[in-house]
Amino acid sequence: MNLVLIGVNHKTAPIALRERIAISREDLPETTRALAAVPGVTECMIVSTCNRVEILAAVEEQGGVERQAAKESPTAGLTAFLHRHFGLDPLLLAPHLYAHCDGEAVRHLFRVAASLDSMVVGEPQILGQVKEAFAVAHAAGTVGGQLEHLLQSAFAAAKKVRSETEIGSNSVSIASVAVELARKIFGSLEGRTVFLVGAGKMSELAARHLVEQGAGAILVTNRTLERARRMAESFAGQVIPFDQLYEAASQADIVISSTGAPHSIFGREHGQAFLHRRRNRPMFFIDIAVPRDVDPEMGKLEGIFVYDIDDLQQVAAAHMAERGREAAGAEALIAGEVDRFHQRQRAVNVSPAIVALQQQAEEIRQAELHRAQSRLGLLSAEQVAAIEALTRGLVNKFLHPPMQALKQAARENNAARVEALCEAWSLPAGAGQENGAGQEPAGAGQVNEPNTAAADGRVSAGNAEKEKAEGAVVNQGSGAVRL
């Protein structure tokens, strides 16, 4: 089993490419299910934001000879899915695509969730976006135990970063960066009219920052009128019907656009009309949508200032030095959390050996009970329960040291010692091999620690009654011995 992550983000691909593979919230469930249908994919999820599109998947590994013959890598099927689903030329996407497998995929996911890979390090939105992507995949039925365990660990690590470092202090976000740009353009934001096109979270954050800086009237429009109404109420603003978008826009000094439209809604011709109505008073467009809502051509007009999500990165870079020390601390914390995750996974991966050891011991116990049957004669239910408790207790006590030795070898990633221990106890070939991160083998949950009560011969009345009712059967599994 391979864990694979491929994608593009604001560091590797321009917005012109990212908007071609952006997935809307409405389309995300269907796209995730389509990804799950790719041969070899057993679990998957997709994170699609304005800054990144990433696929995370558990992929079945082909055998060595088959893999070499097909000249495939674990990423091949996922990359082909991107090309096919979005109609992209492989040569266009290849230079911008990154891929991580297994341990590197885990590390990348942890850094993304902790906002260490964001355009603005420490911004709080990305964790919620990853959680939403996971929830969509869970509802679509495309995640199981492996990704479930991985994502919950990533969320816990991100929470630890927020609580144990100051990386989120002096909060910097795309919204606050946009407000800083607006202040540079207008000098003062006092009394400026703001038009929110799209009632999303980012628009709300930007508007809140603008109001804090003295912005005046707030206009809100959205294709869903009720959402626009709720947003307007929170700012004591005015709702604009979406079909009056262009008439109202010319009233605004600052337009914040973040719709889910598949193409631009503001073109050069709209900008010319706005300037005419405003008698050439400047307008500032903050386009935080992917795909973009504002045609870049509009930004070439004198008096129209257009900034998209990539333009905002330049301003965000100025804040990186201030967060350098906290980011370094967060990176160290994440590295430790990734190591702990791998240690837990390696401990799980010796479960087949532990289960095989227990099964072997149980077979010996049953065989010895069977040999002793003729000498024991007819026993009462209490005697049967006592023998059952005694033999199980002894077996558990003898198994405890080798089980702990296996777990310790796994935590140390000492594969040679795991194999040596398996050989010493004559376990089946391959019992100590890894079976994939986070994937527990059947029966792994049945691993028992020593039962001291049983070893001491203490047997509950309930056990005795149960044995009596079941005809004094020593063990209910295959090979049960009736005394």
Image (cartoon, grey):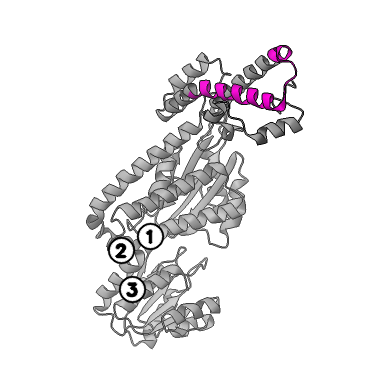
Q: Amino acid at mark 2?
A: Ser
Q: Residues within 10 Å of mark 3 (few under 14, many from 20)?
A: some
What percent of the width, then of the height, locates residue 138? 57, 52
Q: CA distance from mark 2 to mark 1?
A: 9 Å
Report the disc number at residue 209.
3
Left/right of residue 443 with respect to residue 152 in the rendered view:
right
Count up the numbered dots. Answer: 3
Verify CB contact (< 8 Å) between mark 2 and mark 1.
Answer: yes
Q: Is residue 383 magenta?
A: yes
Q: CA distance from mark 2 to mark 3?
A: 11 Å
Would you place residue 399 above or below residue 244 in this image? above
Left/right of residue 304 with respect to residue 24 in the rendered view:
left
Report the disc number at residue 154.
none
Write the start and end of the magenta stretch as one range: 371-400
Would you place residue 444 above or below residue 54 in this image? above
Q: Amino acid at mark 3?
A: His
What percent of the width, then of the height, locates residue 116? 34, 51
Left/right of residue 26 with respect to residue 344 in the rendered view:
right
Would you place residue 339 above or below residue 123 in this image? above
Asked whether residue 304 is in view, the answer is no
Q: Secondary structure at mark 1?
A: loop
Of 200 and 371, the residue lying toward us: 371
Which residue bears the numbered disc 2?
A: 171
Please tell me whether the stretch drawn in magenta is mainly helix, strand or loop.
Answer: helix
Would you place residue 312 above or below residue 386 in this image? below
